[in-house]
Image (cartoon, helix red, strand yellow):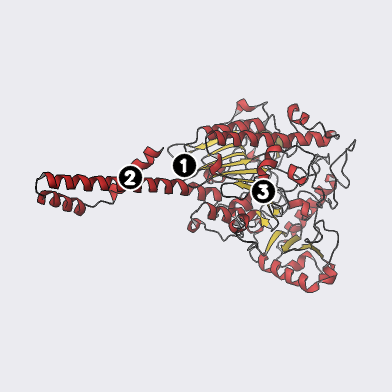
């Protein structure tokens, strides 16, 4: 309160008073005649001084109040399609998210990475995943070696250093092979959720393959840093069995907000499982979408509505504590919607009218719904400039006045603060890299409005534009995951047997001239219909040169879909997934 702030000011004021000041005052008092006249003068002087101190104290209080760092609510959806939110004229009900988007700036050209692990790595490091060994449409599998490298400063660590209370609720999916890789050792005071990339929404189990057999493990925990600084990571939430994880995560988020000490700013990262497969959702949220005539689409919509309801509860909790007006809200999806599960069964998602889906380099794989709203953000605006997921890191560094000197890595992200606040019309970002993967031999770059693709854009064969399912539709054209896996396994085998990694783009298009590559003008053809490479060979070569320069910083992939190590089996950890290496 104001009394506490004023008391703090008085303490700080006393610290500036030196011993020589006090000695000087004692001498003045000793030399003052003891008369009523002089006494009245002293009273007047003291009164003026006290009034001045009160004014200074008030000024200092309001300065501290105004400059207090804002809270940050980061909302990450999992596999949410372009056509699955209300502000894209979706048939799915997202009233809370749509309202928040309308109260801020919609990022109409926001790009994540094509797959979940890579996107999370890019967000928290501000770097392209191909510089971290996490490139390609290959997630980290349960129990497999391969985690976000430790030689990077994470955004959460910067915020923690700046005095933020940092919490992650939901999905981690950046590796947990050692204790040093888990969230509470990477800048979060608490983590409630699951380490792996997906789980059953009710049983909270995740299956993984070791070198012998398939094993399943429980994956719902409440990790935290204790008062003595030690990590606690074995508090398994067994009592959560049978409860949908959206309820669990929402309840935890509200609890954290209600118990938050307002003397510190809050960073709450809500990394939802919704609407990732399997499509499991309470009937209540399905019924909110009874206007959708397709059963598959309607069930999927229920998962989206459940997430929207969660956000409603969380923002209400922030408002009840008086925190909401001092909170920046960022909403993104980690990649485009996935149109089918791993057995080619439709999920119900849609990226229409964008091309492709999760995992591919078409626009539908990584151009995702996104907005920023809240503290100091203009309302009711849309930003058409390209923004990349790596930009969140440096943008928050500026908005929150974080210590840049603590960042050990070079950033690929661009500070977008001035553009988002509409203080500048043009972004500083000239280009970004969708991905560079030496395993699948594919790459893509966007330079201004131009997009160049190398290799096979979608190794899963999803090269079309897919309308939302309607009526009695139950299949997705060209969704053949068995063929996809055989292609993937062959590509990984060939990469390993070659014993070397591509160092130039030439190996992505051997023997093909520039005119045979794929070039699109997204300002006129955002749905990627018309290949213009034959008309602009010089531009193609220019973009190839940029890719070649970026490839000099590429790190060998660590995510090669290796089967889990036997030592990682949950059978060794009371049926739960835990770090297994020292």
Under circle 2, the secondary element is helix
Reading the chain from its start, which is encountered first: label 3 or label 1?
Answer: 1
Q: Secondary structure at mark 3?
A: loop
Residue located 78% across and 29% down the image: 287
Task: Please tell me which residue lies in front, 401 or 436.
Answer: 401
Looking at marks 3 and 2 on the same chain, the residue that comes earlier in the sequence is marked by 2
Between the C-alphas of marks 3 and 2, the distance is 41 Å
In the displayed orientation, state which residue is furthest to the right: 472
* Quarter of the view holding residue 342: top right
Find residue 396 and report its horizontal and vertical position in percent. Answer: 56, 52
Q: Which residue is mark 3?
A: 380
Residue 580 as seen in the image, left or right of residue 228: right
**Of pointers 2 and 1, the one earlier in the residue sequence:** 2
* Residue highlighted by disc 1: 264
Residue found at x 80% / y 63%:
520
- Residue 300 falls left or right of residue 503: right
Residue 242 place in picture, x, y as percent: 68, 26
Camera sees residue 513? no
Q: Which residue is mark 2?
A: 54
- Farthest residue toward the bottom? 538
* In this view, 246 is above or below 408: above
Name, please, the residue furthest toward the front.
Answer: 37
């Amino acid at each position: 309160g104001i009394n506490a702030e004023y008391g703090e000011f008085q303490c700080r004021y006393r610290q500036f008073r030196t011993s020589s000041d006090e000695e000087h005052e004692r001498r003045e008092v000793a030399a003052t005649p003891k008369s009523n006249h002089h006494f009245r003068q002293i009273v007047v002087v003291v009164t003026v001084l006290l009034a001045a101190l009160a004014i200074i104290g008030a000024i200092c209080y309001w300065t501290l109040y105004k400059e207090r760092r804002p809270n940050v609510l980061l909302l990450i959806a999992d596999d949410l399609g372009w056509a699955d939110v209300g502000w894209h004229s979706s048939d799915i009900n997202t009233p809370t998210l749509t309202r928040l988007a309308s109260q801020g700036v919609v990022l109409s050209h926001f790009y994540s990475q094509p797959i979940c692990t890579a996107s999370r790595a890019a967000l928290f490091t501000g770097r392209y995943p191909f510089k971290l060994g996490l490139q390609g449409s290959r997630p980290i599998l349960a129990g497999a070696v391969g985690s976000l490298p430790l030689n990077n400063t994470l955004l959460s660590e910067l915020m923690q250093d700046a005095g933020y209370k940092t919490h992650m609720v939901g999905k981690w999916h950046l590796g947990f092979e050692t204790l040093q890789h888990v969230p509470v050792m990477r800048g979060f005071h608490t983590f409630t959720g699951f380490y792996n990339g997906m789980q059953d929404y009710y049983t909270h189990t995740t299956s993984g393959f070791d070198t012998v057999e398939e094993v399943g493990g429980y994956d719902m925990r409440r990790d935290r840093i204790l008062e003595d600084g030690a990590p606690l990571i074995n508090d398994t939430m067994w009592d959560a069995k049978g409860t949908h994880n959206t309820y669990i995560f929402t309840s935890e988020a509200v609890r954290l907000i209600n118990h938050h000490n307002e003397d510190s700013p809050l960073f709450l990262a809500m990394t939802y499982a919704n609407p990732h497969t399997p499509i499991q959702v309470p009937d209540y949220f399905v019924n909110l979408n009874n206007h959708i005539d397709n059963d598959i689409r309607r069930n999927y919509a229920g998962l989206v509505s459940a997430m929207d309801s969660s956000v409603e509860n969380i923002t209400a909790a922030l408002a009840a504590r008086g925190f909401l007006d001092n909170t920046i809200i960022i909403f993104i999806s980690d990649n485009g919607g996935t149109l089918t599960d791993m057995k080619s069964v439709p999920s119900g998602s849609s990226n229409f009218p964008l091309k492709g889906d999760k995992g591919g380099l078409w626009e539908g794989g990584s151009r995702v719904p996104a907005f920023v709203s809240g503290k100091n953000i203009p309302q009711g605006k849309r930003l058409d400039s390209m923004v990349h997921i790596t930009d969140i890191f440096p943008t928050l560094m500026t908005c929150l006045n974080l210590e840049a000197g603590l960042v050990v890595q070079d950033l690929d992200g661009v500070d977008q603060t001035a553009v988002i606040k509409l203080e500048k019309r043009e972004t500083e970002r000239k280009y970004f890299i969708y991905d560079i993967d030496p395993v699948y031999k594919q790459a893509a770059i966007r330079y201004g409005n131009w997009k160049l693709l190398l290799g096979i854009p979608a190794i899963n064969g999803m090269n079309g534009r897919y309308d939302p399912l309607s009526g009695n539709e139950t299949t997705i054209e060209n969704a053949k995951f068995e063929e996809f896996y055989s292609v993937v396994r062959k590509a990984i085998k060939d990469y390993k047997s070659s014993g070397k990694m591509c160092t130039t783009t030439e190996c992505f298009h051997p023997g093909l001239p520039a005119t045979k590559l794929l070039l699109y003008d997204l300002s006129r053809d955002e749905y990627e219909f018309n290949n213009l490479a034959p008309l602009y060979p010089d531009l193609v070569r220019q973009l190839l040169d940029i890719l070649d320069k970026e490839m000099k910083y590429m790190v060998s992939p660590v995510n090669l879909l290796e089967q889990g190590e036997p030592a990682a089996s949950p059978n060794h950890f009371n049926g739960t997934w835990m770090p297994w290496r020292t």
